[in-house]
Amino acid sequence: MSGQFEASVVVDRPIEQVFAFLADGDNDPKFSPRVLEIAKTTEGPPGVGTVYASTVKDAGMKTKREFKLTEFQAPTKIRWEEISKNTVTAPEGGYDLSPEGDGTRVRVFNVLEGHGFGKLIEPLALRAARKSADDFGQAIKAAVEAS
């Protein structure tokens, strides 16, 4: 069983600028306090096949995560999949961007899926993610607008 959370926010920047910011995974710690460190482990600019390795802290526990970009359509769509093996993973996630007035609407989502013991804690992780989704969207907005 898996579940999804999402947030949508309008960023007061042009779509190309928002896409460039979000496409660079090194920016993740600027809007996601759970990301303690992150590094691109593949060569070249971000695109399909790019892998980012990170250390995150969830519910007081540090874990190593790896995500691979699976779709990359500038300036409107980015998709990823978690390729690391953890108790709860995000087998699919992404950003959808569209122009809105003078700004850009950003929709971010992640599908969460529990494995082994993670099947028991997945509903709690999903509930927490859904509860904080709007704040996460606002953090993305603030980070992009500050860049």
Image (tube, rainbow, N blue to C red):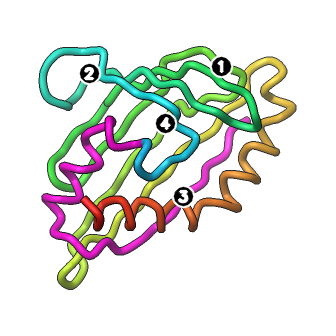
Q: Say whether residue 14 is left or right of residue 121.
A: left
Q: State if disc 2 and disc 4 touch (CB < 8 Å).
A: no
| Separation (CA) of disc 4 from disc 3 | 12 Å
Secondary-structure class at tag 4 = strand
Start-end of magenta stretch: 1-28
Q: Secondary structure at mark 2?
A: loop
Q: Report x, y in % for residue 48.
A: 23, 28
Determine contact: label 1, label 4, CB under 8 Å. Answer: no
Q: Which quadrant of the figure has residue 90?
A: top right
- Of marks 1 and 4, the one in the foreground: 1
Q: Mark 3 or mark 1, which is nearer the start of the sequence?
A: 3
Residue sitting nearer the eye, 125 or 81: 125
The residues tagged by marks 3 and 2 sit, at their Cα atoms, a distance apart of 23 Å
Kindly identify which residue carries mark 2: 49
Q: Residue at x 61, y 29 (%)?
A: 89
Which residue lies at the image location 29% right of the left edge and 48% below the top edge? 22
Q: Decide which of tag 1 and tag 4 comes sooner along the chain.
A: 1
Q: Which residue is mark 1?
A: 86
Q: Which residue is mark 4?
A: 92
**Residue 115, percent across and down?**
73, 21
For label 3, the residue is 6
Given the image, on which type of amino acid does mark 2 rest? Gly
In primary-sequence order, the first of circles 4 and 2 is 2
Amino acid type at image mark 3 = Glu
Marks 1 and 3, how far apart at CA: 21 Å
Q: CA distance from mark 1 to mark 2?
A: 20 Å
Badge 1 or badge 2: first in the primary sequence? 2
- Where residue 2 sits, quadrant-wise, is top right
> In the visual, does 82 lie left or right of 14?
right
